[in-house]
Image (spheres, helix red, strand yellow):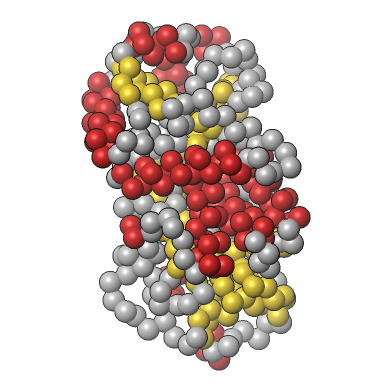
Amino acid sequence: MDSRHTSPAAVHLETQVAVVGAGAIGCSIAYHLARRGVQVTVLDAASPGAGTSSATLALVWVQRKEPVEYMELNLLGAKLHAELAQTYDEDVELYQPGGLSTYIDEPTFLRQLGAMERLNAASPHHKTRELTPREAQQLETELSLDIVGALFSPHDGDINPMRLVFNLARNARKFGAKFLDHCTVSRVLHSESGVNGVETNLGLVKASSVVIAAGAGTPRLVEPLGINLPMVFERGQILVTEPTRRILVYPTGISRQTQRGNILLGTTYEANCAEKQTTAEAGSKIAAASVRRYPRLKDVHIVRNFAGIRPLPKDGLPYLGAVQRLPGLYVATSHSGITLAPVHGKVISELIVDGKTEVPLASYQPERHTHSEQDVF
């Protein structure tokens, strides 16, 4: 271990792979690695699913995600969710009936219609179609005709995010993975030959491979290594109703109904905001827009609200893959973390175990914004 990166702290444990972050992405990576017999340890400052994974609408979403290669990455995520759900020991409430996006203002609808048309032209797999208000109401009978249009994709759905994370973590443990909760990682340790592990508040964790899947905390950990990950933080607020009869058959880009009958209504897109507080103003706007779409909601009570912080790569595309300048280091961080969790798990496990993956990664390289070959030693 390079003396310039050696800490006097005692070695807490040794593992083949250390995964930093126990959200949906980190737990998926652990599950995929552990299933293949890799010794993996997951480190998190809180506990599995305590971050953004617990404060999300939890859509498994494909439609309108540009550019086309990114849409196809999300489509792969949707397909992998269906396959992986059969391997868990409990139901994760995966629901994939298709997704219905509705619009109450024409400029927004026209923008999204343009994205749909571009993706349909670029790929036969997108398969999203435009609906008139009447056609949309035939699919969703509680939907008001007071919309300007709608889009439908057969690929979309939703999932219970906490059941997903807990299943991934529990089943990873069954294959031998270890989880260290309340473990804060301060830096990645390395020598001239590559990574050696990480330094934490519990001591050193030695590892020949380190995966940074820490969401909003990822840039802080890789910046000292000369890796620039431009990221924007965006707050999204969501209202939750009491359980009620089925009103929403289809998830939308901003709402869904759970198996228990609660309806999640959202969402805001508050740029450059990393505070999780909710606001009355946002709640009122969400409620008004929701009732306009679904008038029946005016008689349904709101039981709570919450906010989550979306860690958005500045160019909108995931940071996913191996860091070339530092052997053994991998990054797995993105928006759409629920949809893409199985993709992150598949890709990182294949890169570590097989040294390659068939998933195209050219657009997602972690070093794509790092222009100079800085010395990290």
Query: Which residue corresponds to the image point at 28% horizontal and 71% vertical from the top-left?
Result: 371
Could you tell me which quadrant the N terminus lies in? bottom right
Q: For residue 155, say whether it is visible.
A: yes
* Quadrant in the rendering for residue 11: bottom right
The quarter of the displayed image where residue 123 is located: top left
Give percent across and percent down for residue 36: 65, 61
Does residue 221 appear anywhere in the picture?
no
Image location of residue 365, percent across then percent down: 37, 63
Q: Which residue is drawn at 45% across and 36% down?
A: 61
Give left or right: position of 359 versus 197.
Answer: left
Q: Which residue is drawn at 24% across and 35% down?
A: 121
Residue, x 47% and y 56% (percent of image)?
A: 333
Q: Is residue 182 above or below residue 53?
A: below
Q: How many labels does the image show?
A: 0
Frontmost residue, 184 versus 195: 195
The image shows residue 95 at horizontal and vertical percentages of 57, 29
Q: Which of 362 and 23 is in front in this view?
A: 362
Q: Where is residue 85 in the image (x, y as percent from the top left)?
A: 63, 40
Answer with left or right where residue 135 lies relative to residue 295.
Answer: left
Quadrant position of the C terminus in the picture: bottom left
Image-based side of 265 in relation to 175, left or right: left
Image quadrant where residue 74 sits = top left
